[in-house]
Image: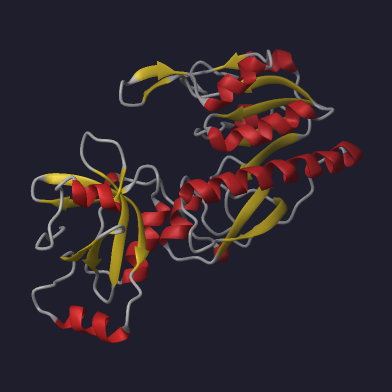
Amino acid sequence: MKIIFAGTPDFAVPALERLIDSPHEVAAVICQPDRPAGRGRKVVPGPVKTAAVKHGIPVLQPEKLKNPPFAEELRPFSPDLIVVAAYGKILPREILDLPRIGCINIHASLLPKYRGAAPINRAIMNGERETGVTLMKMEETLDTGDILLTEKIKILDDDDALSLSNMISVIGAALLIRLLDDVEKTGKLEGEKQDDSRATYAPRIKKEDCLLDWNQGMDRVLCKIRGLAPEPGAFTRLGDKTFKILRAEPFFAERELQIDLLKKKIFRPGSVVQLIKRRGPLVRTKDGLIILTRVQPPGKRAMSGVDFINGGYVKAVSKFE
């Protein structure tokens, strides 16, 4: 089958690579336009574009899909399918109607849960114990199409957004090849309608979503840190400086010691209770204690909790806001 692939970030690369290695033809790749990235803000190609160029596949990078109608640029490719993975734009009706068989989207959740732009982040932030990947037939509305294939994935205690994204992207790529084998036999996309009454949403992460609230419980704080790591990163303030908290872990000590530390009125949520050598600063939440093990100061590279202490960024009397 002749396929047009649409995707931009690292998440989409495994699916593209599996398509390239398959008997199917990748006729063209659609990516978002190149954007400034990194500390130097240099304009660099995205991961999917880099992979496509490496394999000599034509790359299209439209700023807009409707005006002028981008579908006319795609029509000469005469695709059987369009496969989408984290492209970042909603395909208009004229593009959805273009391929002979239809359009498939690889979505990083168990639909209809977590429809939207940030399903991986939101699942971890909400303390979910499992998530998954769904291949669906695309419609004009957001993530509402028929479910074609799914696979569940456990969320481990040490998973963050990056590790879970890597896992889902590889599983999604394998599911895609399995689905295409079936589609080649039947010539159509057959799935099950979503139960809209069970739908939940995963809106795009905004800056205000990333601010840590130390008055929340320990588990909630830890889930937020993991769900936003490594990017965009949960953050907290100390004085006039903002620090990204990229990794933390619960503090399990003797119960009597925990109770004693939590009872002390001087240690309000956000307070640095102790500086633990060879580990990092110990910070109070509403109902527990966590150790900050990886922190990024403003304008600096990320560092271990130990280096954060040794660099003089924090003291035992400090209080994060």
Residue 81 location, x and y as percent? 74, 30
Considering every residue shown, the one lying at the far front of the view is: 278
| Residue appearing at x 51%, y 18% in the figure | 62
Q: Quadrant of the N terminus?
A: top right
Is 279 positioned to the left or the right of 223 in the image?
A: left
Question: Is residue 217 positioned above or below 98 on the image?
Answer: below
State the image coordinates of residue 272 (x, y, percent, origin top left).
17, 64
Q: Quadrant of the C terminus?
A: bottom left
User: Horizontal placement of 97 versus 37: left or right?
Assistant: right
Q: Nearer the viewer, residue 291 or 208?
A: 291
Residue 189 placement: quadrant: top right
Name the residue rendered at 78%, 28% in the picture. 21
Q: Position of residue 194 (x, y in %)?
A: 65, 58
In the image, residue 47 above or below residue 142: above
Query: At which x and y percent is residue 131?
Result: 58, 59
Residue at the image position 32 percent from the left and 21 percent from the top = 41
Residue 127 shown left or right of residue 112 in the figure = left
Q: Is residue 111 visible?
A: no
Taking the image as shown, residue 178 lies to the left or right of residue 113, namely right
Given residues 120 and 134, the one toward you in this image is: 120
Give whichever of 49, 218 is nearer the camera. 218
Residue depicted at x 39% and y 62%: 223
Q: Is residue 230 visible?
A: yes
Toward which corner of the image does residue 290 lie, by quadrant?
A: bottom left
In the rendered view, tell whether residue 164 sits above or below residue 7: below
